[in-house]
Image: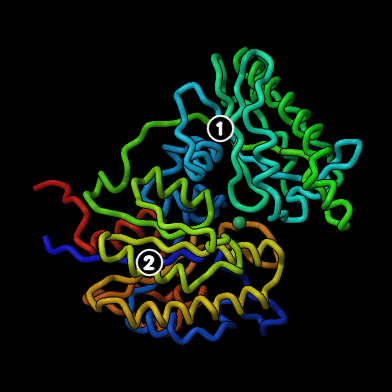
């Protein structure tokens, strides 16, 4: 079978809803995007549900689905994905959790779950917590992920991921830090693990409150990162990589640890750099350069951009529109340098409408551009226009399969 290469560009949280001040258009519809529209005119387009219509997903599940996994069957929690993202090899007994540096008041009520989106000094804060030993000889591995995010791995005997979050969740300002508990009463190993987490969280508060990085932040009028909140506990799961399943060489260009974690699990080579900030100030130039480089040695290259999702969570539709316009310029430069026989796909992991400030189940616009696709009548890349596209409405798994099939990497069922 003839084989071709593919580039899949994922704009995190791209999908949106009509916004009054953008003339009842979405940021993508309102943005000036000649290059995406040019792709759309020569592509097959459609709408994509990450899992199914009406099902809301996180970035982890959205990407698992886009990388070809069925998260309904194989979901092992956010923690282990993040751990892979920061390059911690999990042992079978380990429990991994996703963490935030956060700010609490003296009564342990949350002031800011992201400690003012802290970016400086976080490595020093993480080092101050790693290596501590908890009651029952449980070892702590604590590593910084992206910005205010980090990963906690508990290593010891008789641990269980069946525990609740200490993070009270989004929109929890003023709420107290939760006590970690077994997900069901009577789980003995989970009780032991929950106790370890509670000890860790309270010691993190003690250590971080006194840390020079935070003393300086308070002096400067910034929120101190004076506690670690935990969530998404899980254990390592052995599973077949996607690259092995389809016999392809994959590469992922990304800055965000969740996406890097999923890509690593899927067997993709990682192209990352400190200049990939997983935010709006990421170096788009470097990202496209890495993507072009990766295409030389790989069949499928995934290029991930986080800025769209960040601006959506912060309800900044205008800024989201401008960021999309910058991405469009990057796409223009990429397309000019890519061989015409390479398939180019645009997608998103989920929608994050700015005015909601959270992920919703709205489907996202997608397209596949390439030498022999059945071009439809859609002339611009947007939520409404892609409703009329030839791919119709498909799931993320089906979208990836459609791309891989065009590239010649799918397996045939039956004779
Ligand atoms: Zn998000």
- Quadrant including the N terminus: bottom left
- Name the residue that disc number 2 marks: 291
As drawn, 98 above or below 300? above
The one of 391 and 396 positioned closer to us in this rendering: 396
Which residue of the protein is positioned furthest toward the front in this rendering?
Answer: 212
Residue 376, x across and y down, in percent: 33, 79
Q: Residues within 10 Å of mark 1 (few under 14, many from 20)?
A: many
Q: Quadrant of ligand 1?
A: bottom right
Label 1 sits on residue: 96
Quarter residue 9 falls in: bottom left
Residue 255 in the image: x percent, y percent?
51, 57
Instruction: Indicate which disc, 2 or 1, sits on the residue closer to the N terminus.
Output: 1
Residue shown at 68% from the left, 44% from the top: 124
User: What residue appears at the point 42 percent right and 71 percent down from the top-left corner?
Assistant: 288
**Looking at this view, is 406 or 342 the one in front?**
342
Determine the image quadrant of residue 135: top right
Is disc 2 surrounded by few (<14), some (14 to 19) or many (20+) residues within 10 Å? many
Residue at the image position 71 percent from the left and 38 percent from the top: 229
Residue at x 68%, y 48% (from the top left corner)? 122
């Amino acid at each position: 079978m003839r084989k071709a290469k593919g580039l899949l560009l994922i704009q995190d949280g791209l999908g949106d809803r009509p916004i009054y001040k953008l003339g009842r258009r979405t940021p993508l519809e309102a943005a000036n995007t000649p290059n995406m529209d040019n792709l759309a005119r020569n592509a097959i387009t459609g709408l994509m549900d990450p899992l199914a219509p009406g099902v809301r997903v996180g970035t982890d599940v959205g990407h698992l689905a886009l990388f070809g996994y069925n998260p309904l069957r194989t979901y092992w929690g956010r923690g282990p994905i993040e751990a892979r993202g920061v390059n911690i090899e999990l042992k079978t007994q380990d429990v991994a959790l996703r963490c935030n540096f956060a700010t609490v008041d003296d009564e342990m009520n949350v002031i800011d779950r992201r400690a003012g989106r802290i970016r400086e000094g976080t490595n020093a804060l993480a080092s101050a917590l790693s290596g501590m030993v908890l009651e029952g000889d449980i070892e702590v591995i604590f590593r910084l992920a992206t910005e205010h995010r980090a990963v906690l791995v508990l290593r010891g005997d008789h641990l269980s991921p069946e525990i609740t979050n200490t993070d009270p969740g989004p929109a929890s300002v003023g709420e107290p830090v939760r006590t970690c508990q077994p997900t069901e009463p009577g789980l003995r190993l989970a009780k032991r693990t929950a106790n370890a987490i509670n000890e860790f969280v309270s010691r993190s508060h003690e250590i971080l409150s006194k840390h020079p990085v935070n003393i300086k932040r308070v002096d400067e009028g910034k929120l101190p990162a004076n506690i670690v909140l935990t969530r998404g506990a899980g254990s390592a799961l052995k599973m077949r990589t996607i690259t092995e399943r389809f016999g392809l060489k994959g590469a992922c260009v990304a800055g965000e640890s969740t996406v890097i974690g999923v890509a690593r699990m899927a067997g993709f080579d990682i192209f990352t750099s400190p200049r990939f900030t997983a935010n709006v100030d990421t170096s788009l130039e470097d990202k496209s350069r890495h993507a072009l480089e990766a295409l030389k040695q790989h069949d499928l290259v995934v290029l991930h951009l986080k800025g769209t999702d960040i601006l959506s969570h912060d309800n900044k539709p205008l800024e989201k529109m401008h960021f999309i316009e910058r991405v469009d310029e990057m796409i223009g430069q990429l397309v000019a340098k890519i061989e015409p026989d390479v398939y180019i796909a645009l997608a998103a992991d989920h929608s994050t409408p700015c005015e909601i400030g959270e992920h919703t189940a709205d489907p996202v616009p997608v397209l596949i551009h390439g030498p022999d696709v059945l071009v439809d009548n859609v002339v611009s890349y947007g939520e409404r226009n892609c409703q009329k596209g030839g791919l119709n409405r498909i799931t993320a798994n089906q979208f990836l399969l459609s791309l891989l099939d065009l590239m010649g990497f799918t397996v045939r069922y039956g004779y």
